[in-house]
Amino acid sequence: MRARQTPARTLALVALVAVLGVSLHAWGSPEGMELAEDLAGEEQGTGGGIVLTLALAAMIVLGAPLFVIIGVLAAICFAMYGEASLYDPSTCATLDPDAICGFDTFPAKMADLTTKNVLLAIPFFVVSGAIMSAGDIANRLVAFARALVGWMPGGLAVATVGGCIFFAAISGSSPVTVIAIGSMMYPALCKAGYDSRFSMGLVTTAGSLGILIPPSIPMLVFAIVAGGRVPLDVGELFMAGILPGALIGVLLSLYSVWVARRSGESERTRFTFAEVRLRFREGFWAVMLPVLILGGIYSGIFTPTEAAAVSVIYALVVELAIHREIGLSHLPKILTEAAVMMGTLLIIMALAFGLNDFLVEEKVPDMAVEVIRAMNLSPLQFLLIINLMLLVVGALMDSISAIMIIAPLLKPIADQLGIDPVHLGVIFIVNLEIGYLTPPIGINLFVASSVFNKPLGDVIKSVVPFIALMFVGLGIVTYVPSVALGPVNVLLRDEPFYEPLPEMGDDGEVVRPGVATDTTIKKPGEKTEDGEARVLSMEEMTEIGEQMFVLCDAAEVVVDAELPPDQRLAKWREELESEEVANPEVMKIVALAKAVDAASYERVVDAASGLMKTEWTCEALQTMLTPAGDDAADDDAAADDDAAADDGDAGAGSGSGG
């Protein structure tokens, strides 16, 4: 029966998409626009809402995959609520191959995903995880963990948690960890006298640590979609996940010890240094992969993207030349499976990215920020709302889709409330870990049901006490920011380990209680009493980042106005003033644009990149500062002379180039 239903549902889905395509094309025509206005009154709201609701209901009934639902809804949103002229067929009457009009707009939005450099790291980490997961690494890691903790009460269960943590760091995938470690440890736990339900719940839950322990694909996705024009530091995100992952691992281990003591389980192994040394030697190359990747990133030897490529080479060398559990003949199958997984991720990301772009274009995040600010929520209250929202979202959506859709909406609000974006990312990941364990979408539940050959209801019951432990870990990670940000502060930011939770002061401004502040205001770069240059706070960096966005947007306004060169700078500064750009550091950068020439743009870029600790560019500003007309060559030559003069006068002053 199922074989006959699948083609029918597929054909019905294809027919639905075709009908929607024809309908949207008609809606984009002038007659369709008039019909939309008649249905909606003023702005197509009612008509668009009806189409969205009907399309969503139809796709759910037909069992459409999530990426199809996201893509169709995004296309409808662009057609119904996007700029009407883009979907007027008359606007496409052009021979310009670079012109984007009609429904070319939607794939053009998705194509912006290719500009994210961090995206390249995802396929590399997927491939390296697939190669090492196909070998004998799981057995070696569990054997090493058991040699370390097998002497404890509940030592086998604790070793299972440790094996999941190590293996998750290698594979980067929660379902793969459940399959690799669970298929081996579930029978061993049952044989050792542990309750079947406890054993199943333990391996299913511990496997979810795969998205928190770096390198983590969901963390990479969060850095892509939540970074905006200034990308988040993936290295900071990776490091921020280590301590929370260890915390949740400790909670699971303590619960395992308590269960073992209560049940009287007494199977233990004798601890010997010789056994630990032997098992460590056997698992050395597996343990060293995360050390190599994270060490290379934090030492500056390579970027996260380059680290992902290194991980592939490392995995190939270890599995083919050292472990030799797989051979060259196994690689085609392994790479095929990795390609299928990567293809699935890219489809979801591309479609969700298109939907995100529509939301940004329609200023939905801005409206959400205003709504939250109007509610006068404190950071603590906002984090509580985030957790409740993400717990629901995680139960209904896979982690990648949830991050792609929800993170861009919440990130601007978190910035306004002084919440560190790295901390926000870890909160996202821990919430979505719980989502792996909650019906109806919890993927680890379905994987465990298949691997252990148990009814789904039994698997759900087995994870209930472990979900309670995850809630404890989530509360600690959320409301004690030092758990995530402490190592980042000490090792990467040269700041104290303690990171307080932001609060709202009486004046409505964000404050960080418990942090001693110097009443003497020092500018970045000035020396403090201990001789060190002052480091910008997160609040200052957030303000600077937002005003740098405005700086580029104002340049785009000037470019669109097509003003002559002698009027551009005045118009630009007028736009900045109207947008209340007043941060002293940003205004210093603005002052570097002294004339419409290439030298001014180079000065601005150098100063902005130095201030923001990342490469900063603005195509609109470059266009604005590019001379136009027949005098362009002369202006360029003059710009070169000015640049040389500026370099020569750098030590004498700030711009008296006489």
Image (cartoon, rainbow, N blue to C red):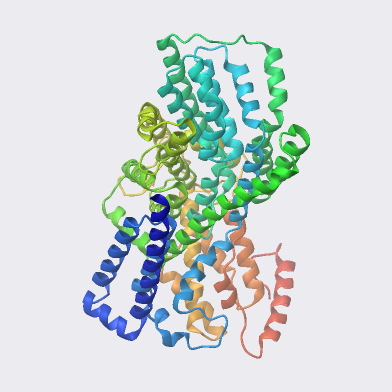
Which residue sits at x=43%, y=11%? 261
Q: Quadrant of residue 70?
A: bottom left
Q: Quadrant of residue 8?
A: bottom left
Quadrant where the C terminus sits is bottom right
- Left or right: 215 in relation to 203: right
Residue 529 seen from this side: no
Viewer-closest of 453 and 308: 453
- Left or right: 468 in relation to 558: left
Please determine whether, in this image, residue 649 is positioned above or below residue 628. Answer: above
Please determine whether, in this image, residue 79 is positioned above or below residue 632. Answer: above
Please determine whether, in this image, residue 45 is positioned above or below residue 99. Answer: above
Q: Position of residue 358 (x, y in %)?
A: 41, 66
Residue 289 seen from this side: yes
Viewer-closest of 393 and 25: 25
Please determine whether, in this image, residue 469 is positioned above or below residue 398. Answer: above
Which residue sits at x=60%, y=22%? 145
- Left or right: 441 in relation to 111: left
Viewer-closest of 103 and 370: 103
Going by the picture, which residue comes out furthest to the right? 321
Q: Position of residue 635 (x, y in %)?
A: 67, 83
Counting every numbered tag in the picture gives 0
Q: Position of residue 245 (x, y in %)?
A: 51, 33
Q: Position of residue 176 (x, y in %)?
A: 55, 38
Viewer-closest of 47 and 98: 47
Which residue sits at x=38%, y=50%? 1
